[in-house]
């Protein structure tokens, strides 16, 4: 397996789905360290050139158009609601913000370079330009262009013998090859999906930036072990294509963890269930709210349907540039409230998934 020296080791603990506080560093003689964040679960995908060629050839235009969304998710009937103590624990963690990068690796905010190190970024509070529009949108085609039309894309995979689709987004990362999506878009029903690819900028069957094959998949231990909806987060590392890394081609959005709740957000995705057909990028915008029913997730007024799962939620999204800071993903809806979309809070567990993914080298696919 490929690793870089900067991957921060994490202590694997049996959590039973409990929310654990972040690792605390203490001087000798100080108080005992808090329990470490559980290590993400890793699954090798197409990590050889031969496997990558097979997967890329598998996804014909016809198979992509025929791919259907997964069945709708819902929290368990005894899901854990957000409590004051849980919210306080989240707010106590150090906020982390990694800035976006333009194609070629330049810092999209100021033209400089960035390593995208989730560990080194702790305490950094840089963000993109403030959003220029705060109007509420419940699910409309995105027609303004900008960076999001390259970083957001459709995800395709095989699940229990059938081809399915989700959404995902390229983010700033040390390996320049990391895609963030939902946990159920990499694993569901006890098994990881196969034939996993990311198609940034998908548009009516067109693949303007190519088809990027996953070499490694990551998700939270809570999703892996119990499909805990509060931790429905995943990342994929994709192989270079034609000698170039993903964010060198399409750029990468910023990503943030341990942020304040109830903020203005923009959500994007490729809904493929009626009345949508998966052919175009759709968005919602508004102020997030806390789920008061059966999860600890964030909510947003949004009409997107199946297939949008894994699509990014952005803080500080600038509608003029298409740049923002990814801070959640489309996850689930309640059957009785189709106008609400919910996404997981990006805390220490989501940050651990990002750090593990961006610290993993992607093997080069040498031949087309």
Image: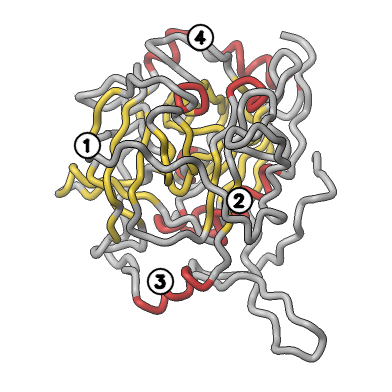
Question: Tag 1, which secondary structure?
Answer: strand
Residue at 79 percent of width and 83 percent of height: 27
Q: Nearer the viewer, mark 2 or mark 3?
A: 3
Which badge, 1 or 4, is on the more N-terminal residue?
4
Query: What's the distance in space between the residues labelled 4 and 2, CA to CA?
Result: 30 Å
Q: Which mark is residue 138?
A: 1
Q: Please identify, in this view, whether the residue under mark 4 or under mark 3 is nearer the observer.
A: 3
**What kind of element bears circle 3?**
helix
Q: How many marks?
A: 4
Q: Earlier in the sequence, mark 4 or mark 3?
A: 4
Residue indicated by mark 3: 87
List the residue tagged with mark 4: 60
How far apart are the alpha carbons under marks 3 and 1? 27 Å
Tag 2–tag 3 contact (CB < 8 Å): no
- Percent x, y for residue 294? 28, 63
Mark 4: secondary structure:
loop
């Amino acid at each position: 397996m490929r690793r870089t020296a900067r991957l921060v080791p994490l202590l694997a603990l049996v959590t039973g789905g409990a929310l654990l506080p972040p690792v605390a560093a203490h001087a000798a003689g100080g108080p005992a360290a808090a329990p470490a964040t559980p290590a993400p679960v890793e699954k090798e995908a197409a990590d050889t050139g031969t496997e990558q060629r097979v997967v890329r050839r598998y996804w014909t235009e016809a198979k992509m158009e025929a791919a259907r969304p997964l069945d709708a998710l819902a929290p368990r009937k005894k899901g854990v609601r957000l409590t004051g103590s849980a919210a306080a624990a989240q707010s106590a963690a150090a906020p982390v913000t990694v800035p976006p990068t333009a194609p070629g690796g330049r810092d999209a905010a100021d033209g400089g370079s960035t390593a995208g190190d989730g560990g080194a970024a702790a305490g950094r509070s840089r963000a993109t330009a403030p959003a220029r529009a705060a109007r509420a949108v419940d699910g409309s085609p995105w027609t303004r262009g900008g960076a999001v039309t390259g970083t957001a894309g459709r995800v395709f995979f095989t699940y229990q013998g059938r081809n399915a689709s989700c959404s995902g987004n390229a983010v700033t990362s040390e390996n320049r090859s990391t895609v963030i999506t939902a946990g159920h878009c990499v694993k569901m029903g006890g098994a990881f999906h196969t034939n996993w690819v990311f198609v940034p900028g998908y548009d009516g069957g067109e693949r303007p930036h190519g088809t990027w094959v996953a070499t490694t998949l990551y998700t939270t231990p809570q999703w892996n072990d119990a499909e805990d909806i509060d931790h429905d987060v995943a990342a994929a590392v994709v192989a270079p294509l034609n000698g170039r890394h993903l964010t060198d081609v399409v750029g990468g959005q910023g990503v943030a963890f341990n942020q304040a709740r109830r903020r203005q957000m923009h959500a994007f995705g490729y809904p493929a269930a009626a009345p949508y057909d998966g052919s175009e990028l759709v968005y919602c915008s508004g102020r997030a709210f806390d789920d008061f029913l059966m999860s600890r997730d964030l909510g947003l007024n949004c009409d997107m349907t199946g297939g949008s799962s894994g699509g990014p939620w952005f803080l500080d999204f600038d509608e003029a540039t298409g740049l923002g800071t990814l801070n959640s993903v489309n996850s689930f809806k309640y059957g009785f409230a189709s106008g609400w979309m919910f996404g997981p809070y990006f805390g220490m567990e989501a940050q651990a998934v990002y750090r593990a993914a961006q610290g993993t080298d992607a093997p080069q696919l040498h031949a087309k």
